[in-house]
Amino acid sequence: MRTYSLDDVFETRKRRDSWWTVYFVDPVACRVALPIANHTQLTPNGLTVLSLVLGAVSATCFALNHHVAGAVVFYLSFMIDCVDGKIARLKGTGTPFGLWLDYVGDRVRVVLCAGGLAYGQYALTSDVRYVVLGAAVAVLDLFRYVNAPQMKRVRDAVREERGEPEPEEDIDSLERVALVPRPRRPRSFPRRFNRFLARHRVRSHLISGIEFHAAVFVVAPLAGAWALIPLAAVAGALLLVNEVFLVYRLWRFTRRHGMPSSQESREHVLV
């Protein structure tokens, strides 16, 4: 059986990822993945189930108002969720069912933990704002993960209609521009900043669902119960701004590429 090195595990990291994952999760997940790959028979699906179980434990801790324990276990759950993907890519053992299980497991974990936080704080304070908080977190997360594949479907449909090749996975149009050599000319700050992020494997979307989860289920509980509503509200607002920006970019993309021009249509008919 092949023995893997830490460099092999590093090669399984995504080309660009969320800054929370790059700086706070991957350094741990890679070192956890190494002994799992070399000394156990754990499968990616088994790790995904373990991540979901830890998510349920985290939700229970939140429901009992053990916020620090809940935050630590949530971090472990997310970290293991990253490990399963690394093992799948390292050993080539990923499956279509595993993709589904990973996707659905993430949503279940967030709903459970949001419910645990809301229940625990409402039982302690009878403050209905915590019920609203739990519902808002669950809805925002579900919207984010329903919206993302739908936007991808629209982009893919437009590219297929125009006969354009599909871009590399996880690299959006702005990020591809940052990675392709271009003639030397003065660069705008957004392009310089995006190149800086690309060199450090960080996505240009700085507030994504992952940062939202980290703020609500790790940072806020560690800061104390007083921080739950303010931090969740700020993180939720930033996530919404990011989603609105992505939808705006999708709208511009469809306006620019959605349908062939009238001249192109006439030429197609003549051919």
Image (cartoon, grey):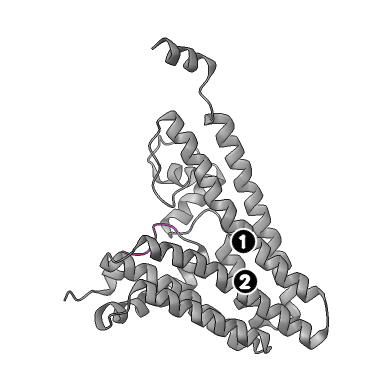
Q: How many other residues sit within 10 Å of disc 2, few (<14), some (14-19) or many (≥20)?
A: many
Q: Are the residues flagged by discs 1 and 2 in contact, CB closer than 8 Å?
A: yes
Residue at image x 69%, y 88%? 65
Q: Which residues are magenta?
A: 12-16
Q: Residue furthest front?
A: 97
Vertical placement of residue 135 versus 53, above or below: above
Vertical placement of residue 257 versus 222, above or below: above
Residue at image x 52%, y 78%? 75
What's the residue type where badge 2 is placed?
Answer: Val
Vertical placement of residue 212 versus 122, above or below: above
Reply yes or no: does residue 15 show up in magenta.
yes
- The residue identified by callout 1 is 142
Query: Which label's residue is closer to the chain start, 1 or 2?
Result: 2
Q: Nearer the viewer, residue 50 or 192?
A: 50
Q: Position of residue 114 (x, y in %)?
A: 66, 74
Dividing the picture into quadrants, the one containing residue 236 is bottom right
Q: As drawn, is 38 to the left or to the right of 170?
A: left
- The residue identified by callout 2 is 111
Q: Nearer the viewer, residue 204 or 114?
A: 114
